[in-house]
Image (cartoon, helix red, strand yellow):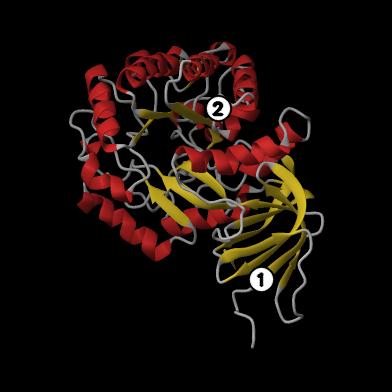
């Protein structure tokens, strides 16, 4: 009897198993993990991926990506965005709702779901918006949407009204949903577009103050504590946000949070007057970066999410002041973090993998782990491969990254979705 064409052995790798790194063979059969053992004997006609010297992880999960479709397919599509994610080692991504139409009703959401079913090469779990049209005025029907989405967010803009956010949390608590907040007090922006710090003042730019983020985090944590809603803070960038969330967790507030690779590895000192250094929130001070690293190490920060936000080359060609906010991130996250944090000893490899894989899945109840019986969603990484990031070779339609040209180690060599290379 011939083996199933979907039977595959990954042989001789170092696997991330329940938070520890162990030498393991992994047998895949019919799209699922059939066996994990230090040594697995098979017949000669079963395909083998030789993984000696390579790291094997369950597929990464990015809980904050912008796939731009429907509504802005010239920036990115479901097809190109998920190919980029697979190249970066991701087998699950959560797609933010700043789309056209906004996924604020089942009918509008269905437009996005049709594209996902047709074009995605990995799992794409959509967000719905918190308010209709992301306008902050009327809540969506969470009960009608929750079965098809991972959480609710008005990402791209914070919910400005205190009463509206409290009502959203009360509804989310009743419906057992998650509120994922882009925290930004628009009254404090004052036309800024980079961090309001030393570099901004020395180079004649307009700044975004840290308070615009952490004041809304502070407000939302109080509402979360009052309502008991499950609350997730998107892309934190300031030391104050880290401290507020750490203290809230110590009080038992049901809050989780994420930060991005760029906030952990760059700061205002790295800025150039180029669109590829412009994102929201902006790169903050070196002290903020250090606080974020500390928060990641001590577990205050639950997950690393790229906030992959592609734009056209023209939209990113107007310098810091005129360019659109957002950078691409799916294809650079692991090598940048491994090179900048793990190799210098700032972060353990085990903690990095947890923040890219188990942490995001736990927050949003996505599921999946490197255990027998699970779907064979795996990432194989060559930690010794050294190269320079070349954005011209990205699968994403967006090529704006502050990491272009950076020398890194750690190349994603294979990503399997249900046992099939994607």
Which residue bears the numbered disc 2?
A: 301
**In this picture, is 64 found above or below 208?**
below
288 relative position to 51: left or right: left
Question: Does label 1 or label 2 sit earlier along the sequence?
Answer: 1
Are the residues tagged 1 and 2 within 8 Å (C-beta)?
no
Q: Nearer the viewer, residue 269 or 56?
A: 56
Residue at 56 percent of width and 56 percent of height: 86
Circle 2 packing at 10 Å, graded few (<14), some (14-19), many (20+), is many
Report the Cα–Cα distance between label 1 and label 2. 36 Å
Counting the numbered discs, the total is 2
**In this picture, is 115 found above or below 4?**
above
- Disc 2 is placed on an element classified as loop
- Disc 1 is placed on an element classified as strand
Which residue bears the numbered disc 1?
A: 8
Q: Nearer the viewer, residue 270 or 113?
A: 113
232 relative position to 419: left or right: left
Can residue 98 be spotted in the picture? yes
**In this picture, is 136 found above or below 377?**
above
Quarter of the image with the C terminus in it: bottom right
Quarter of the image with the N terminus in it: bottom right
Can residue 421 be spotted in the picture? no
Q: Nearer the viewer, residue 102 or 62?
A: 62
């Amino acid at each position: 009897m011939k083996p199933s064409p979907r039977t595959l052995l990954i042989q001789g790798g170092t696997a991330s198993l329940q938070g520890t790194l162990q030498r393991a063979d992994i047998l895949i059969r019919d799209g699922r993990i059939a066996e994990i053992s230090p040594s697995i004997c098979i017949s000669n006609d079963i395909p083998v991926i030789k993984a000696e010297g390579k790291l094997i992880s369950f597929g990464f999960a990015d809980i904050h990506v912008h796939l731009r479709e429907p509504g802005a397919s010239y920036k990115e599509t479901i097809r190109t965005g998920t190919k980029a994610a697979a190249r970066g080692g991701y087998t699950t991504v959560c797609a933010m709702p700043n789309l056209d139409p906004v996924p604020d009703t089942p009918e509008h959401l269905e437009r996005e779901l049709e594209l996902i079913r047709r074009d995605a090469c990995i799992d794409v779990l959509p967000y719905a918006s918190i308010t209709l049209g992301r306008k902050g005025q009327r809540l969506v029907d969470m009960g009608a949407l929750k079965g098809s989405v991972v959480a609710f967010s008005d990402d791209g803009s914070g919910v400005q009204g205190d009463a509206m956010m409290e009502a959203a949390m009360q509804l989310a608590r009743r419906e057992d949903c998650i509120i994922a907040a882009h925290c930004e007090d628009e009254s404090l922006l004052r036309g800024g577009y980079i961090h309001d710090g030393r570099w901004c003042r020395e180079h004649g730019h307009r700044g975004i103050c840290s308070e615009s983020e952490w004041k809304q985090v502070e407000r939302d944590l109080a509402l979360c504590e009052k309502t008991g809603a499950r609350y997730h803070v998107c892309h934190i960038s300031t030391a104050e946000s880290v401290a507020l969330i750490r203290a809230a967790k110590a009080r038992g507030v049901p809050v989780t949070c994420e930060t991005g690779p760029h906030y952990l590895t760059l700061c205002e000192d790295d800025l150039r007057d180029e669109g590829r250094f412009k994102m929201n929130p902006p790169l903050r001070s070196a002290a903020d970066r250090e606080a974020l690293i500390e928060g990641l190490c001590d577990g205050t920060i639950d997950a690393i999410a790229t906030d992959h936000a592609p734009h056209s080359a023209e939209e990113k060609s107007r310098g810091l002041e005129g360019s659109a906010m957002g950078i691409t991130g799916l294809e650079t996250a692991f090598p940048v973090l491994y090179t900048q944090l793990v190799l210098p000893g700032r972060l353990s490899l085990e903690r990095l993998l947890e923040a890219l894989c188990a942490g995001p899945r736990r927050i949003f109840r996505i599921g999946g782990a490197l255990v027998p019986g699970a779907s064979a969603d795996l990432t194989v990484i060559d930690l010794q491969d050294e190269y320079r990031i070349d954005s011209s070779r990205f699968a994403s339609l967006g090529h704006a990254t502050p990491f272009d040209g950076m020398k890194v180690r750690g190349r994603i060599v294979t990503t399997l979705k249900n046992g099939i290379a994607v």
